[in-house]
Image: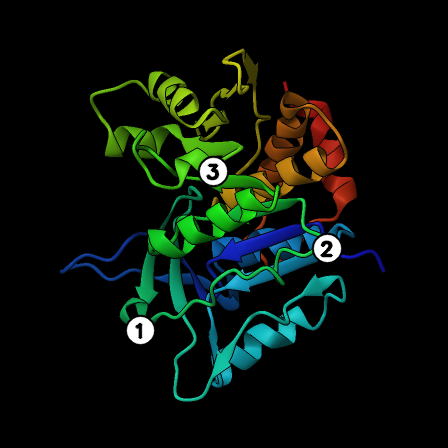
């Protein structure tokens, strides 16, 4: 078996998926339409989809507890022989991170996170980066472990992919090769500036490529030199948008590892994220690579 060339580092948890007819209010209960548990967290989501497509993947970040939720997560990991999880630590007396995903009929979602104050992470080491070409970072948690990971990766010549940086002075930005940002999140964090203008600023500050996603609207790609291109996502009936951004990064990495240009790799990201939205629970159903390839035909 070939060694892993991608390290997904960051959030790992056990999701509690709840499909609701509405969000509850003080006076009005919500009805549960569907419920199940599946492995979640941005890093685990990306890693599982990539492993399912036949790529050797390394995963690390959040630690697990020696408890029933932790055992459930490890049981899922064991189904994927291409998934290297030897750096995912386990602790007795520690609660595995959990997240409730509240999904509405239109596919939009809200989250309730458990035990964040107790969350533990295993720092990135040289051993984790052996043979790695890309490190896929998420920003779902404290910055410092991600900054340390990016700094070490960059020093070793490992390319850095990260999402959700919205400040030109962010400590991680100097180590980034490709940044993925959401237009909606950008407007919530920096409402005074157009997301595309902010993308230009971030690209110049970090000397990096920036991809701006905007739900089902146009995706804009700025290469490291500032050249701009566009992708139009296909129209899909979204059942659940949870994790679509994580799986966009999976498709993007699949394309980059195959030697595609950034715009062509981003088309794979759009196709993968679109396929993800068709299924309930980000890792409850891992769509095969053939389905993502078929979706490419509808990406503009």
Viewer-closest of 155 and 297: 155
Q: Which mark is residue 165?
A: none
Q: Residue at x 57, y 38 (%)?
A: 248
From this viewpoint, which residue is outermost toward the top? 227
Viewer-closest of 107 and 283: 283
Distance from disc 3 to disc 1, alpha carbons, whole Å, reads 28 Å
| Nearer mark to the viewer, of 1 and 2 | 2
The C terminus sits in image quarter: top right
Q: Residue 264, percent across and down?
A: 68, 23
Of mark 3 and mark 1, the one earlier in the sequence is 1
| Nearer mark to the viewer, of 2 and 3 | 3
| Nearer mark to the viewer, of 3 and 1 | 3
Q: Are marks 3 and 1 in contact (CB under 8 Å)?
A: no
Q: Residue 232, percent across and down?
A: 56, 19
Image height of 151 relative to 10, above or below = above
Distance from disc 2 to disc 3, alpha carbons, whole Å, reads 21 Å
Distance from disc 1 to disc 2, alpha carbons, whole Å, reads 30 Å
Helix, strand or loop at label 2? It is loop
Residue on which disc 3 sits:
175
Residue on which disc 2 sits:
4
Task: Give neighbour class at mark 3: few <14, some 14-19, many 20+ (Cα, 10 Å).
Answer: many
Helix, strand or loop at label 1? It is helix
Q: Are marks 2 and 3 in contact (CB under 8 Å)?
A: no
């Amino acid at each position: 078996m070939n060694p892993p060339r991608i390290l997904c580092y960051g959030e790992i948890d056990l999701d509690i998926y709840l499909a609701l007819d509405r969000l509850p209010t003080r006076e009005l209960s919500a009805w549960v339409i569907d419920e199940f548990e599946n492995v979640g967290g941005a890093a685990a989501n990306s890693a599982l989809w990539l492993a399912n497509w036949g790529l050797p993947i390394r995963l690390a970040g959040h630690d697990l507890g020696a408890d029933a939720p932790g055992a459930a997560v490890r049981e899922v990991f064991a189904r994927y022989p291409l998934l290297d999880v030897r750096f995912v630590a386990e602790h007795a007396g520690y609660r595995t991170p959990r997240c409730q995903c509240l999904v509405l009929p239109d596919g939009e979602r809200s989250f309730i996170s458990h035990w964040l104050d107790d969350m533990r992470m295993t720092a990135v080491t040289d051993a984790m980066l052996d043979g790695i070409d890309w490190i896929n970072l998420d920003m779902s948690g404290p910055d410092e472990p991600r900054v340390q990971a990016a700094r070490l990766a960059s020093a070793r010549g490992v390319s850095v992919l990260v999402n959700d940086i919205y400040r030109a002075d962010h400590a991680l930005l100097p180590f980034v090769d490709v940044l993925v940002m959401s237009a909606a999140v950008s407007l919530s964090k920096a409402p005074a500036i157009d997301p595309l203008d902010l993308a230009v600023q971030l690209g110049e500050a970090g000397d990096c490529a920036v991809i701006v996603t905007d739900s089902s609207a146009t995706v804009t790609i700025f290469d490291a030199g500032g050249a701009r291109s566009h992708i139009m996502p296909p129209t899909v009936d979204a059942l659940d948008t949870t994790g679509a951004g994580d799986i966009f990064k999976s498709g993007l990495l699949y394309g980059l590892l195959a030697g595609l240009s950034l715009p062509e790799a981003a088309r794979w990201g759009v196709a993968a994220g679109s396929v993800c939205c068709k299924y309930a629970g980000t890792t409850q159903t891992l769509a095969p690579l053939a389905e993502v390839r078929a979706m490419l035909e509808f990406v503009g």
